[in-house]
Amino acid sequence: MEETNAPDRRSVLRAAVWAAPVIAVAAATPLAAASTQALSWTWTAQMATTRQAETYFTATNSSDDPIDVVFVAPRKQGAVELYGYGFGSWAVSLTSTTVVCTATIPAQGSLTTPFLGYFTRTPPATEVLVASLTPGASSVPTLTLTFT
């Protein structure tokens, strides 16, 4: 006599296929959250004149594991055109539209990369530069330049 309430083979396989991705996503979430909380940044201007600005972006890792980071900024932002000229461990790539900087921030460490901004027109009194940082930190990187 055949039991009618038992699941068939297809139902069991379908349930197994859908269960695997859920487990993988649940396992990855705590690691991503820990990286985000461990990463902080500063973006400071050392000089801002009527023709150029010299700025420095620093990423700091407070975790016990290295973190791979990617900093991306539009090349042209208002009156400023950014040029990255990374030193040390940052790899800098320039396209016609973006500056991309990548690095592995050591455990409990920091890395800094400089940028020069040249003005394509007369700058206003201030200009706000923006970028993105992956993995995300507590806030999006921004820098307000005040011109002299």
Image: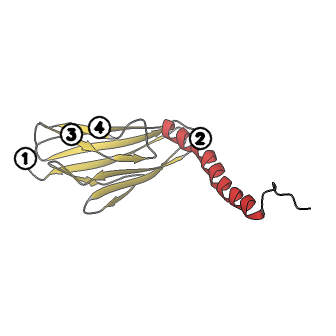
Where residue 41 sits, quadrant-wise, is top left
**Left or right of 145 on screen, residue 120:** left
Amino acid bearing label 3? Met
Q: CA distance from mark 3 to mark 2?
A: 40 Å
Kindly identify which numbered label has been placed on residue 44. 4
In this view of the protein, which residue sits in the foreground, 11 or 97?
A: 11
Of marks 1 and 4, which one's residue comes earlier in the chain? 4
Kindly identify which numbered label has been placed on residue 30. 2
Marks 4 and 3: CB-CB under 8 Å? no
Q: Nearer the viewer, mark 2 or mark 1?
A: 2
In this view of the protein, which residue sits in the foreground, 37 or 22?
A: 22
Q: Is residue 19 above or below residue 31?
A: below
Q: Residues within 10 Å of mark 3 (few under 14, many from 20)?
A: some
Of marks 3 and 2, which one's residue comes earlier in the chain? 2
Q: Residues within 10 Å of mark 2 (few under 14, many from 20)?
A: few
Of marks 4 and 2, which one's residue comes earlier in the chain? 2
- Assign a secondary structure to mark 3: strand
Mark 3 lies on residue: 47
